[in-house]
Amino acid sequence: MRKAAACLFVLAISCWGQESRATLGGRVIDAQGAVIPKAEVVVISDSTGVQQQTQTNEQGNWVVRFLIPGSYSFKITAPGFKQTETHGIQLQTADNKSIDTPLELGATSTQVTVTAETLLVDTTAATSGTVITQEQIAEMPSMSRVTTLLATLSPGVVQQDQNQNIAHLWSHDAATRFTVNGGRNNDRSNSFELDGMPNLKTGGQVAFIPAPEAIQEFRVLMNAYDASLGRQAGGTVQMTLKSGTSRYHGSLYEFNQNNVLNAKLFQTNLTGGEKPPVHFNEYGGTFGGPVWIPKVYNGKEKTFFFINYDGTRNADPRFNIRSLPTELERQGDFSQSFTTQLVSGQRVRFPIQVYDPLSVGSDSNGTRRLFAGMVVPASRLSKVAQNILKYVPLPNTPSDATGNATNNFVPNSTRQNKMADVTVRGDHSWNNRHKSFATVRWYHEDELSGDEFHNAFTGAYQHRMTRGSGIDHVWTISPTKILNLKMNLTRYEEPNNDHGVGFDPSTLGFPASFTSQQAVPSTPRITGLFGDIGVN
């Protein structure tokens, strides 16, 4: 599956759609409340030092758009007035906030410093939503570490049933399973964006799930959408990736779970077995800062990067109780085999009867004959079936009361996952009128499940792969016109193959150049064990 999107916006300030980045603006007035036109305004990112300049218009208003969420300051300078600096302004994803600034008469060289003490309220948009902050993402306890599920911290968001499973970074369905304000109860109700670009796979689920360490924050938008978003029955999750800052920062982490403190499971108690292995390791690191190449390029206050790598190694128990042939049955002896049926509330036993298929038509009525003593002669046993049985273990627990060979094997199997996840973002400020960012996202996950016999006879591989990239460029043409160019490409693949694809039961082996993870299409599955023997 491949999705690509390109967007072009040339918009006036008066008709602005919902944008995942933040907008900061305000009005500049004097002590009597009169507006001050053509005042110089400089907005400064506290984390990168990048500055963006603008001027107030004839009504004293100013606005700076497409700001990366974070902490900001701004300073205002006008002839005949003291310079005023305002600090401590926190902008979140999709914020559109405004603050009025009064200037005092005096020399321009005199500076007045103001610290924002109250949270600015977005009074320009009817859209409601909740921002899940970086602190919440880092500190909320979570077995899954799937950030989208923290959307349930927002009012009106309800988690759907996960069927007692723990979601992981490859769990696209689980990561999508929540409803917003009573939206439709399926995986197509919500929309997902990453840095303002679509992040969806076929079916409507989220396509790429960044590790929590790669996410700055995200907003859950709920209602009153404008035309840029209003096409889904639920909500919109707008995730923002972390960006590099003016200083180099990095981190290392590992999350581990094992069976040391676990109790024995019911299934292992059936066979008197040991505790099954549980080994979950998720590890990784982050690194970001200004781009600096000694003697070549110094990107301080201009070019920044951020990289996150996340790896997972997982093995957790899976139980699918099987019914396997007994040792006598493998030898063709069905004299002890039986099944049961409830008759008037009583369980009645019926012996297994084995007919010779070559005896059909031996008389004029076409009657089949039973094998003597319900034992198939050794010369009549299928060689292919006998080869297959070498890969089928013997029962390891007594049969239940419904038959002589029913639910008599409890496997000691695990689901095994291996995954690598990479997120990269780069930001560049060309000048006051041009700025760009680009992202690259990639992950590859391999899962082996159903390996109950620990050989080629059981088990299947599932592979999940997402590759994507996005480019965004903003050109401030004039104080009332902005050109925003976006390009986004997402490719999602989910191939599957059998553990034993290519295995030849007649020769007990694979082709010489074959590996068990190769995907060979349309390979027939083995469905019978006893060849030309008829069993009733």
Image (cartoon, rainbow, N blue to C red):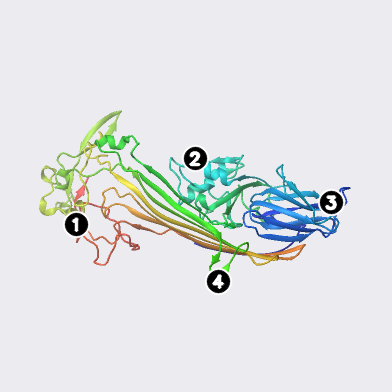
Q: Is residue 186 visible?
A: no
Q: What element does badge 1 sit on? A: helix
Q: What element does badge 2 sit on? A: loop
User: Which of marks 2 and 3 precedes in the sequence?
Assistant: 3
User: Which residue was labeled with disc 3?
Assistant: 29
Q: Nearest to the eye among marks 3 and 2: give it.
A: 3
Amino acid type assigned to the residue bearing label 1 in the image: Val
Q: CA distance from mark 4 to mark 3?
A: 45 Å
Amino acid type assigned to the residue bearing label 2 in the image: Pro
User: Which residue was labeled with disc 4?
Assistant: 296
Q: Nearer the viewer, residue 454 or 505?
A: 454
User: Which of marks 2 and 4 precedes in the sequence?
Assistant: 2
Q: Nearer the viewer, residue 523 or 5?
A: 5
Amino acid type assigned to the residue bearing label 4 in the image: Val
Q: Nearest to the eye among marks 4 and 3: give it.
A: 4
Residue at left offset 81%, top offset 56%: 108
Does residue 25 sit above or below 144 in this rendering? below
User: Which residue was labeled with disc 2?
Assistant: 141
Amino acid type assigned to the residue bearing label 3 in the image: Ile
Residue at left offset 33%, top offset 38%: 260
Residue at left offset 30%, top offset 37%: 267
User: Which of marks 1 and 3 precedes in the sequence?
Assistant: 3
User: Which residue was labeled with disc 1?
Assistant: 384
Residue lying furthest top in this view? 345
Which corner quadrant of the image does residue 501 belong to?
Answer: bottom left
Q: Is residue 462 visible?
A: yes
Q: CA distance from mark 4 to mark 1?
A: 69 Å
Location of residue 236 in the rendering, given as x and y in whole percent from the top left corner? 61, 50
